[in-house]
Image (cartoon, rainbow, N blue to C red):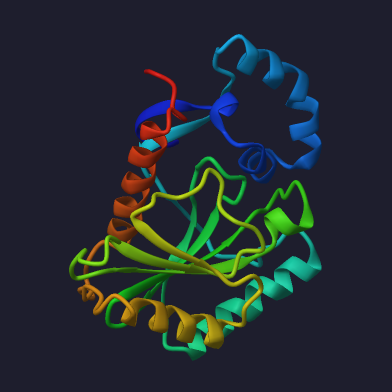
Amino acid sequence: MMGGVSRRLNLAALTDDELQRLVGPERAVSLLPELSLARLDRRALPGPLVSETLAPQPLEDRAWGATPEQSRAIASLHADLLAAGAAPLGTYYLPGVSEVRHLRAYRLEPDSTAGLRWSETPETADTGWPFVQVLTWLRDRASGFACVLTSSARQPYAPALSEEIDMHLHPDCPVPDLLAAHRAHVLRHGRGQKLQADADWTRPWQAMHALNVAAWDRRGLLLPE
């Protein structure tokens, strides 16, 4: 289940690019007639639920992957993260707007957290393909950003993330290069907030999710409760 209060995403308020990335090109085309009418009549088209609170559900570890190729990619990225010194924190099912709902969490000392993401039921090869995202919260917001997110996902996030997140996309970037790029992005702003070894690993992700929910609300993407 998704935790906290949940509200529906208004598909009619998304840009065309966001809609395609969110539901896939085929479904986006099938939604066009209904979407056009909704926009013309200035009414909402309810979409997926968006919760205010992330609610990761622990999963027993096993050989993950919808295809042999995907399984090999997950295993390879996991091995690369371990080689880079990442501490694994378990595998979870994380309900959300996107179909990419499987997450293996990691802590990267001293100030970063990472997630290996993939979908067990991908709509397309690109949307379900495993990728790594690295998150660091900044010590101060003098630059106008609250945190830095670096991702090897093949396509941009949908809906677009909060303007307070310094987002960098490096599609299919190898883990060592991705981590080096992330450190460089963080250094542009100063220093990251150190993570305590025993801290709840979900806190940085929950805080980023809260920024996104607030940004989506400002854009009118979330329907009233």
Q: Does residue 208 sit above or below 181 in this rendering?
A: above
Kindly indicate the quadrant of the structure image that contains residue 202. Answer: bottom left
- On the question of residue 47 being in view, the answer is no
Question: How many callouts does the rendering have?
Answer: 0
- Tell me if 1 is positioned left or right of 67 in this view: left
Question: Residue at coordinates 73% horizontally, 42% vertically from top-left?
Answer: 24
Name the quadrant of the C terminus. Answer: top left
Kindly indicate the quadrant of the structure image that contains residue 40. Answer: top right
Residue 125, percent from left and from top: 78, 57
Residue 216, percent from left and from top: 42, 37
Q: Does residue 73 sit above or below 25 in this rendering?
A: below
- Tell me if 12 is positioned left or right of 137 in this view: right
Residue 110, percent from left and from top: 27, 82
Q: Does residue 54 sit above or below 70 in this rendering?
A: above
Name the quadrant of the N terminus. Answer: top left
Question: Residue at coordinates 39% horizontally, 82% vertically from top-left?
Answer: 183
Question: Residue at coordinates 62% horizontally, 45% vertically from top-left?
Answer: 99
